[in-house]
Amino acid sequence: MSLAKLRSVLCLLFGAGIFVLLILAINGTFSAGIIEPARLSLPPPLQDPELTVFASREQIAIWYEAVGTVQSETRVNIASQVTGVVLEIRVVSGDTVHTGEVLIRLEDRELQSRRIQALEAKNAAVAALKQAETEYARILTLAENRRASQRDQDAALSSFQQAEAGMKRAAEMAEEAEVALGHATLRASSEGIVDRRLAEPGDLAYPGKVLLLLHNPEKLRLEANVREGMIGQLSYRDSVGVTITARQADLTGVVAEIIPSADPISRSFSVKVDLPPHAGLFPGMFGKLRLQIGWREAVLVPAQAVRTVGQLNTVLVRETDGAWRRRFVSVGGMVDEERLEILSGLDGGEPIGLR
């Protein structure tokens, strides 16, 4: 017999064997065991639990969530107002600073020189003004005795006025030089924490260049994007829920600002919510604005009533025959600190055993 014919015969025999086994299984006999599909029984009852509660059907809130980022309400850029080399930076990221505290010192030799020159020019202007004032007074005395002409009086007055104007200009230049010298020392304008250090000693500072970033940890807010369909649910000074995922914190914030124009790409509005003081909050953290938009019915059980094995969840339920058995359920999220939602497997009102 050829190999191909032998293979065909074996396949026929194997198929016939499978058919016979199926017939035997349907008839209820297979090997030494008994299979009776029409008479399958429920799992054996379990021991009665020590504590029994009831699955409840309740109205729970429907929440809309908008993702956002924690930001500081007060963000201060410490920037140079003069040109100079950075000599010293006295703080690093994370340091707490106080109002008026010296943060950065710039090289100020040129500014010191300008200040000295301005003071010398001011002193010269003061002397010139005193001389012009004395001369004008002398001419006025001579004029009273008819010993000075009107032309002499006009010339003396003009010299006095020019000296007075020169004095004002010199005083302004001296003040400007003093202010410029003060800009070489950068101080904290408010209480805060150093967020970022953007310069190092030896760097060149120039007007407008930001050297440090500060934020106030006591005044934080969540800046979230709320879709246009929900913006009508919010108003200024409304209290809203805020969840900070990293801290597992549920806070109550107050709407401080609603930007009155939507982003044309995301079709959302920027909403800023002031947060209460909370330990461990920092700018840049992820958060969610939670807004209640309605109610729905749900089946709830205590979280400790659910047993999880792998990806399967079961609840110990007393069936209609009075026996306690485990029932597979589909679980939703926690609705409060102790209870979670059952999506399927329970209708509400069933006696539940606590493990």
Image (cartoon, rainbow, N blue to C red):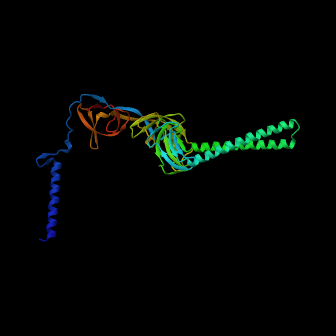
Q: Quadrant of the N terminus?
A: bottom left
Residue 291 visible in the picture: no
Q: Residue 160, how many percent across, how many down? A: 77, 41
Of 68 and 179, nearer the camera is 179
Q: Splitting the image into 4 quarters, where does residue 39 fall? A: top left
Residue 56 visible in the picture: yes
Residue sitting at x 17%, y 56%: 19
Query: Is 224 on the left or on the right of 19, as rendered?
Result: right
Q: Quadrant of the C terminus?
A: top left
Q: Residue 150, how many percent across, how many down? A: 87, 42
Q: Splitting the image into 4 quarters, where does residue 121 fall? A: top right
Residue sitting at x 27%, y 28%: 52
Of 200 and 222, nearer the camera is 200
Q: Splitting the image into 4 quarters, where does residue 146 fall? A: top right
Q: Residue 343, how many percent across, how many down? A: 35, 39
Q: Is residue 204 above or below residue 137?
A: below
Of 233 and 7, nearer the camera is 233
Q: Is residue 304 above or below residue 123?
A: above
Query: Which residue is at the far right?
Result: 146
